[in-house]
Image (cartoon, rainbow, N blue to C red):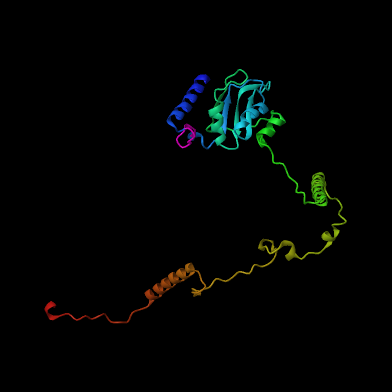
Amino acid sequence: MNPLTNIKNQNKLNERELKLGIAGDLRKSWHQKYKDSAWIYIGGLPYDLTEGDIITVFSQFGEVININLLRHADTGKSRGFCFLCYEDQRSTVLAVDNLNGITLLKRVIRVDHVEQYKVPKYREGADEETKRLWEEGCAPKPIRRIDKNISQSKLEDENDAKNKVVSLKKLMKKTAGNVDMDWKEQSKFLDKSVKEENFYGPNKHFSFGKKNDVIEEPTHNPRPDFEKADWRDIEIWKEIREREKAEQGGSKKCDWKQEEHYISSRYR
């Protein structure tokens, strides 16, 4: 659709909300669809505008924390549209309602919401300033305020400590690839006699030439301690005991005579 037609349709929506009396109520407004996105699209920009110029125009409705002005990869010239992010999502509603369809440097610009903003792909050919803008954004950094009660000596001590840390890091990087060839200092560790137990540690795989003590398995079913034993061991013990009883019961001879039951004469 023609960008000018989109601008007119969007302005008609705003006029209709004013007539219905729901302007400003985000629960009923068409802006409710974009409540989770703080990004806006700005199209039809003059090609001479830079990121700073765009931020100057749009910062009147809120603090701008990020901007992505699309440029040609070969020439670096602006492509006439960009994406801008506010710190507060409500600023997007003000920018869309007030700046959509205005004339900026003899060009009509279009301002609209962005429901799902896609982060630009990383390019190695981009300049350092663009990479820094992608990583850090354009939000103003907080200024560190120094308390007047802090003495100058404490500040100097903090700076000295920071300088020492930086110097140590540089020294560690320089000496990272160096190999210590001074074996005289390590001779006491090489000449020191170490017992076999301490050398290999308590690992049974290094017991060379030693007889392994084979633990004899019990010939009977040991009775477990019912207070300390696991329930699985108790159930296994019960099962084995039942099997042993069954085997012993089948081998024994029964010398009892057969059972006798009283039967009434009328059933005989």
Q: Is residue 142 magenta?
A: no
Residue 241 image-quadrant placement = bottom left
The answer to whether 9 appears left or right of 189 in the picture is left
Q: Which is more toward the observer, 166 or 8? A: 8
Residue located 28% across and 82% down the image: 257
Query: As displayed, is residue 34 above or below residue 197?
Result: above
Residue shown at 61% from the left, 29% from the top: 58
- Which residue is found at the position 65% from the left and 22% from the top? 78
Residue 123 seen in the figure: yes
User: Depth check: 86 or 1 in front?
Assistant: 86
* Dominant secondary structure (helix, strand or loop) of the stretch shown in magenta: loop
Q: Quarter of the image holding residue 214?
A: bottom right
Quarter placement of the C terminus: bottom left
| Residue 143 image point, x, y percent | 72, 41
Front-most of residues 65 and 59: 59
What are the residue bounds of the magenta stretch? 23-31
Position of residue 215 measured from the top left corner of the image (x, y, whole percent): 59, 70
Q: Position of residue 190 (x, y in %)?
A: 82, 59
Can residue 112 be seen from the camera position used here? no
46 relative to 225, above or below: above
View extreme (left): residue: 266
Taking the image as shown, residue 180 lies to the left or right of residue 78, namely: right
Say left or right for 52 vs 236: right
Q: Residue at x 51, y 71 (%)?
A: 229
